Image (cartoon, rainbow, N blue to C red):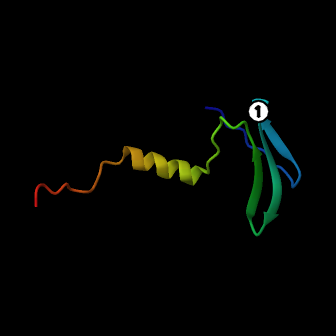
Amino acid sequence: MSTLVLKRKVGQGIVIDQQVKVEVIGIDKGKVRLAIQAPSGIPIRSKQTSELSERRITMPSQHRRIKNL
């Protein structure tokens, strides 16, 4: 996996693999707003949402099954 660290100003952006465009559209109180354009076949998720989905898949169920009450 590659990591590239960049500084961008509002209105600037990056292009990934000539398909995905990421642009900084706002910065307010330490929060950055990004606009992401990608082909419909490429899912776009926040890191937190993606990590939560991975945890749900890999965590064993904590619920017990109740047999024939």
Measured from the top left, where is residue 40 in percent x and y? 69, 38
> Can residue 63 be seen by looking at this rendering?
yes
Which quarter shows the N terminus? top right
Q: Is residue 45 above or below residue 25?
A: above
Residue at the (54%, 48%) spot, across then down: 50
Residue at the limit of the structure toward the front, as seen here = 68
Residue at the limit of the structure toward the bottom, as seen here = 29
| Left or right of 45 in this view: 34 | right
Label count reads 1
| Left or right of 5 in this view: 41 | left
| Left or right of 56 in this view: 44 | right
Task: Give residue 41's quadrant in the image.
Answer: top right
Residue at the (21%, 56%) spot, across then down: 64
- Disc 1 crowd rating (10 Å Cα; few below 14, some 14-19, many 20+) is few
Residue at the limit of the structure toward the right, as seen here = 11
Q: Is residue 9 above or below residue 44?
A: below
Helix, strand or loop status at disc 1:
loop
The amino acid type of the residue labelled 1 equals Gln
Q: Which residue is mark 1?
A: 19
Measured from the top left, where is residue 34 in percent x and y? 76, 53
Measured from the top left, where is residue 30 in percent x and y? 74, 65
Task: Give residue 17's quadrant in the image.
Answer: top right
Q: Nearer the viewer, residue 13 or 20?
A: 20
Residue at the limit of the structure toward the left, as seen here = 69
Q: Nearer the viewer, residue 56 or 27?
A: 56
Q: Nearer the viewer, residue 6 or 43?
A: 43
Measured from the top left, where is residue 7 in percent x and y? 81, 49
